[in-house]
Image (tube, rainbow, N blue to C red):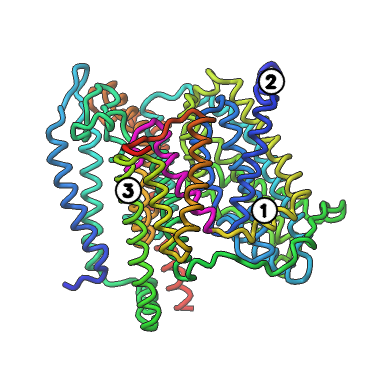
């Protein structure tokens, strides 16, 4: 109770509450406009936190995160274009409802379901995270290494069609981590005599470059094609759009779907590489079993994906906060932002910064409530955002990308790194190299090296130490299974196809 | 043997050349530290070794026959009309042009400072896409001015200054 009150005290001040509101509005706005994602918004808002206190900065980024996940449904429903990849499954029933003149109702259900999923996963996070952190505190270097490798392998395995390309990107990220001073001896590695590289390469300029620069360049190319005409017209009158709060009958109809979607989203969110659009699509598909009308433009078809996509947030925060392992790009950004302010995610966070942990829980809860109020009462303003020329936003994003990468440590080299990361991300996308393993490699690289070397030092260089610890062996075994997963899947699919051909 | 995936072939060759240079740099690192045998060379060496194996696998894969999925993607690409091919090429060239402008902006920041360089860079980008030059300039100055004021005067984050500003 004392910790809860401490967290409440940290959050309940005008500055933090105002910053929280600003972040939630920004997340909603970025998520509403197709082509702009709240992931981009998150990386661009990190530099804005430099002048803020630790809790306010976390509240700002969490606001963008939670607000952004909720807002993606509006354009999916009203325009048939998902505002965020996670809202893609909402298009099916949501847009059908909009075409049948029930767009406002669908938006109301989406807002309610998003917040339901978010709060459900937050409760799970509050119950599970402190216990998991207690267990993780007992882990030694070999187990931590194996666990981090498991997270790394999960993301590599699930993030692309080609495993070799995924691993290639991941190891590129791990190599980038070796630039700078050696974490144990301080010896300069791959700095080429540049003092600015001694501190290593921070993940933030890479994230800013990878997410903002290709988006900006693609928008400029698209605008050039249209000769700079940026005005867009909405296919409906924003004044007539209304998002009514679901009635008791409607809530009763979707309650089963809401619980199923939220539980599935939370569970999948915990697995590195499984957050994002996978959970909403699975929820949409599975919920057809007890809501057979899904697909015909019904409220259950909106509630299933929307509850699941917000629930992945709480799920993905469990390994990020307890173990320091980000499950997706957004939790990697959150991890980067927390680290920049001196809060290192991992089991120690629950020991040294208990107040902050509770402040995060309370902030998330308040942000979900804010998102609910903003979506119901501000829907007419939000749908007007759909008509804002994307290019004007892109111009500001370009400037924020430059400022943001520099402001991280007032280092010009980071601007160059940001540009190079953007250029590399553009080519990676063109040639089917997944970006997430590279980011995870950069985020986890130092942790992997530190624990690998510490474990080998304990064992006098013998790798048997990883096999002698039962838990380490289990994690490494699971990591190998994850890496072989695409191959196993291929064999199962081809044997099934052969059987069917024979039959 | 015929190269079936020319992009993967070129990329893996280029990667192997870069990796060879990095290996050369890695071998200059100390093999052991004072307290133990696992020195600064250990992790980069292991990572580079696995990375090189992956590049070789990519190289071998570039000679392998295409899978059904890849064949379908290639057939779709081959079926594109000359106009679509020309548009894709033009889009790529335009992307490179915008990357070029951003790159020059990054270089100029070190000489002219943040405000002047990014204002020039953004004005050029907006003019190229079809905005009138004076409209682009006003937009770039106003947007940049607001952000500059927020960061420098409100958040106390100094931005790079140069010979002009």
Sequence-wise, the earlier of marks 3 and 1 is: 1
State the residue in front, A319 or A22. A22
What separation in Å lies between label 3 and label 2 (alpha carbons)?
A: 42 Å
SS under mark 1: helix
Residue B109, given in percent of the width and then of the height, sits at 34, 42
- Could you say which disc has been placed on residue A5 in the image? none
Nearer mark to the viewer, of 1 and 2: 2
Sequence-wise, the earlier of marks 1 and 2 is: 2
Classify 10 Å Cα crowding around label 2: few (below 14), some (14-19), many (20 and above). Answer: few
- Could you say which disc has been placed on residue A9 in the image? 2
Residue A35, given in percent of the width and then of the height, sits at 53, 58
The answer to whether one can see residue A319 in this image is: no
State the residue in front, B9 or A149. B9
What separation in Å lies between label 1 and label 2 (alpha carbons)?
A: 32 Å
Q: Chain of mark 1?
A: A
Q: Which residue is mark 3?
A: A420
Seen at 45% across and 78% down, the residue is A502
Sequence-wise, the earlier of marks 3 and 2 is: 2
SS under mark 3: helix
The quarter of the displayed image where residue B73 is located: bottom left
């Amino acid at each position: 109770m004392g910790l809860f009150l401490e967290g409440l005290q940290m959050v309940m001040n005008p500055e933090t509450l105002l910053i929280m509101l600003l972040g939630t509005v920004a997340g909603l706005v970025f998520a509403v406009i197709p082509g702009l994602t709240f992931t981009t918004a998150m990386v661009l808002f990190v530099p804005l936190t430099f002048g803020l206190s630790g809790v306010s900065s976390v509240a700002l980024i969490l606001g963008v995160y939670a607000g952004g996940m909720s807002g993606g449904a509006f354009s999916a429903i009203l325009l048939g274009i998902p505002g965020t990849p996670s809202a893609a499954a909402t298009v099916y029933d949501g847009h059908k409802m909009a075409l049948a003149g029930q767009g406002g109702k669908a938006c109301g259900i989406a807002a309610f379901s998003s917040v339901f999923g978010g709060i459900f996963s937050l409760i799970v996070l509050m119950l599970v995270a402190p216990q998991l952190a207690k267990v993780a505190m007992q882990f030694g270097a070999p187990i931590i290494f194996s666990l981090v490798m498991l997270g790394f392998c999960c993301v590599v395995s699930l993030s692309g069609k080609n495993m070799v390309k995924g691993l290639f990107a991941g190891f590129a990220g791990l190599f980038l981590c070796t630039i700078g001073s050696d974490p144990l001896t301080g010896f300069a590695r791959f700095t080429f005599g540049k003092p600015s590289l001694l501190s290593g390469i921070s993940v933030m300029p890479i994230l800013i470059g990878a997410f903002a620069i290709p988006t900006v360049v693609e928008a400029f190319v698209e605008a050039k094609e249209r000769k700079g005409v940026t005005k867009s017209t909405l296919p409906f009158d924003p004044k007539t759009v209304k998002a009514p709060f679901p009635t008791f009958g409607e809530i009763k109809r979707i309650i089963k779907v809401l619980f199923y979607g939220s539980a599935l989203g939370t569970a999948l969110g915990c697995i590195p590489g499984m957050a994002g659009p996978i959970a909403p699509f699975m929820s949409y598909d599975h919920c057809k079993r007890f809501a057979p009308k899904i697909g015909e433009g019904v409220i259950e078809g909106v509630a299933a994906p929307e509850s699941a996509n917000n629930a992945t947030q709480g799920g993905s925060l469990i390994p990020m906060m307890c173990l320091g392992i980000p499950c997706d790009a957004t939790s990697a950004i959150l991890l980067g932002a927390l680290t920049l302010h001196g809060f290192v995610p991992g089991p120690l966070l629950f020991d040294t910064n208990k107040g902050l942990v509770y402040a995060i829980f309370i902030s998330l809860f308040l942000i979900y409530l804010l998102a609910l109020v903003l979506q119901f009462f501000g829907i007419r303003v939000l749908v007007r955002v759909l008509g804002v020329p994307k290019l004007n936003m892109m111009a500001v994003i370009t400037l924020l990308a430059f400022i943001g990468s520099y402001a991280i440590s007032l280092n010009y080299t980071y601007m160059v790194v940001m540009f190079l990361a953007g250029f590399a991300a553009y080519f990676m996308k063109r040639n089917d190299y997944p970006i997430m393993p590279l980011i995870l490699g950069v985020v986890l690289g130092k942790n992997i090296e530190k624990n690998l070397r510490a474990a080998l030092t304990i064992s006098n260089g013998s790798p048997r130490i990883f096999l002698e610890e039962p838990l380490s062996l289990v994690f490494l075994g699971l990591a190998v299974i994850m890496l072989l997963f695409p191959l196993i899947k291929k064999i199962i699919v081809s044997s099934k196809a052969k059987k069917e051909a024979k039959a | 043997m015929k190269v079936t995936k020319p992009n993967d072939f070129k990329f893996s060759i280029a990667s192997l050349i870069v990796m060879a240079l990095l290996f050369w740099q890695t071998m200059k690192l100390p093999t052991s530290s004072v307290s133990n045998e696992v020195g600064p060379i250990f992790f980069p060496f292991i990572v580079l070794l696995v990375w090189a194996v992956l590049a070789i696998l990519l190289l071998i894969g570039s000679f392998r026959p295409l899978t059904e999925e890849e064949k379908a993607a290639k057939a779709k690409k081959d079926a594109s009309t000359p106009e679509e091919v020309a548009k894709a090429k033009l889009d790529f060239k335009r992307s490179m042009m915008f990357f070029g402008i951003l790159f020059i902006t990054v270089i100029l920041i070190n000489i002219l400072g943040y405000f002047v360089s990014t204002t020039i860079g953004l004005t050029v980008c907006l003019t190229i896409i079809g905005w009138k030059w004076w409209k682009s300039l006003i937009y770039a100055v106003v947007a940049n001015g607001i952000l500059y004021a927020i960061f420098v005067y409100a958040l106390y984050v100094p931005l790079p200054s140069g010979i002009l500003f």
